[in-house]
């Protein structure tokens, strides 16, 4: 079973070794799962994707579980390729009338896991430049860490730190946390500035393309400060919001 980076994925290959005459309907249970090539990545990331092997009862079900795991491992964007081989178990090759097999997973990890991007855009008449740095698998758990910065020509700016854990526990679940600091300058039109500090966490289960859809639970807390307000010329609506305020949702 091979999964690579090509636009059209390589054909799935189940490689039964020392199992003559094996067919997809051949009864078989997995005795041992061996992971090789995972130097930076923790083995639990790979083993969690292969939990379906525990209930597989023939080579066809083993093949299907490996095919699904290969697609999920590829979606993490931390592996160049993953190869799955099924071998007759060396110790105690059968369990009653049911043959036992070892599944050997050999992965090739990507060497470049950091990306950077920059851009220029305009929002509400203010030109801004932004930059983002993203690192995957820094701690070996397939996590994504990132920092994003934005600076505007009228002193507006944003600084954001975030962390995402995809495929949490080998399930179709995503955990996300971030902290953000923003300054919005309204000096040009309304003569005040708005500062914000926010922190948020969220958990999402499912996918929009799946029949069950995507379900997400999130919580956000923040502080807002309206400052640099000229008392004599500002409207009552602006003056009433001057100072610190907190919110959560």
Image (cartoon, rainbow, N blue to C red):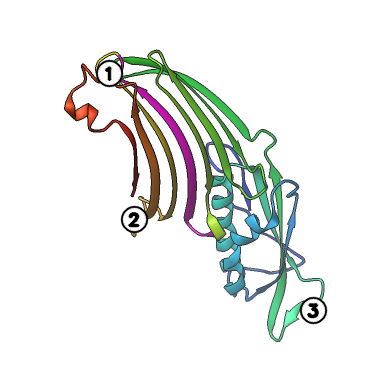
Q: Between tags 2 and 1, which lies in front?
A: 1
Could you give the CA–CA distance between mark 3 and mark 1, rounded to whole angstroms? 83 Å
Residue 83 position within the rendered picture, expressed as x and y whole percent measured from the top left: 68, 51
Task: Assess whether mark 1 and mark 3 are in contact (beta carbons under 8 angstroms).
Answer: no
The answer to which of 157 and 94 lies nearer the viewer is 157
Query: Can you say whether 204 is above or below 52 in the image?
Result: above
- For numbered disc 2, what is the local secondary structure? loop
Main secondary structure along the magenta-highlighted residues: strand
Circle 3 crowding by C-alpha within 10 Å: few under 14, some 14–19, many from 20: few
- For numbered disc 1, what is the local secondary structure? loop
Quadrant of the rendered structure where residue 91 is? Answer: bottom right
Taking the magenta stretch, the answer to whether it contains residue 42 is no
Query: Can you say whether 160 is above or below 151 in the image?
Result: below
Give whichever of discs 3 and 2 has the lower sequence position.
3
Residue 205 position within the rendered picture, expressed as x and y whole percent measured from the top left: 42, 57
> Residue sitting at 25 percent across and 18 percent down?
190
Q: Which residue is mark 3?
A: 92
Q: Which mark is residue 230?
A: 1
Taking the magenta stretch, the answer to whether it contains residue 175 is yes
Q: Which residue is mark 2?
A: 213
């Amino acid at each position: 079973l091979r999964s690579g980076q090509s636009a059209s994925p390589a054909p799935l290959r189940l490689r039964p070794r020392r199992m003559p005459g094996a067919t997809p309907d051949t009864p078989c249970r997995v005795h041992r799962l061996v992971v090789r090539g995972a130097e930076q990545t923790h083995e639990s990331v790979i083993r969690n994707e292969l939990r379906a092997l525990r209930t597989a009862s023939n080579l066809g079900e083993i093949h299907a579980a490996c095919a699904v795991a290969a697609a999920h491992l590829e979606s993490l964007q931390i592996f160049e390729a993953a190869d799955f081989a099924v071998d007759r178990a060396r110790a105690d090759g059968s369990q009653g009338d049911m043959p036992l097999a070892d599944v050997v997973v050999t992965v090739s990890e990507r060497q470049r896991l950091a990306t950077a991007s920059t851009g220029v855009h305009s929002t509400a008449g203010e030109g801004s430049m932004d930059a983002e740095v993203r690192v995957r698998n820094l701690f070996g758990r397939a996590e994504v860490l990132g920092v994003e910065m934005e600076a505007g020509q009228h002193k507006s700016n944003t600084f954001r730190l975030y962390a995402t854990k995809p495929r949490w526990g080998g399930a179709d679940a995503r955990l996300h946390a971030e902290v953000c600091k923003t300054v919005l300058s309204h000096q040009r039109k309304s003569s005040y500035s708005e500062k914000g500090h926010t922190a948020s966490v969220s958990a999402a289960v499912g996918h929009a393309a799946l029949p069950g859809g995507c379900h997400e639970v999130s919580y956000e807390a923040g502080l807002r400060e309206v400052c640099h307000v000229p008392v004599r010329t500002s409207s009552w609506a602006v003056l009433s919001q001057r100072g610190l305020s907190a919110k959560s949702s």
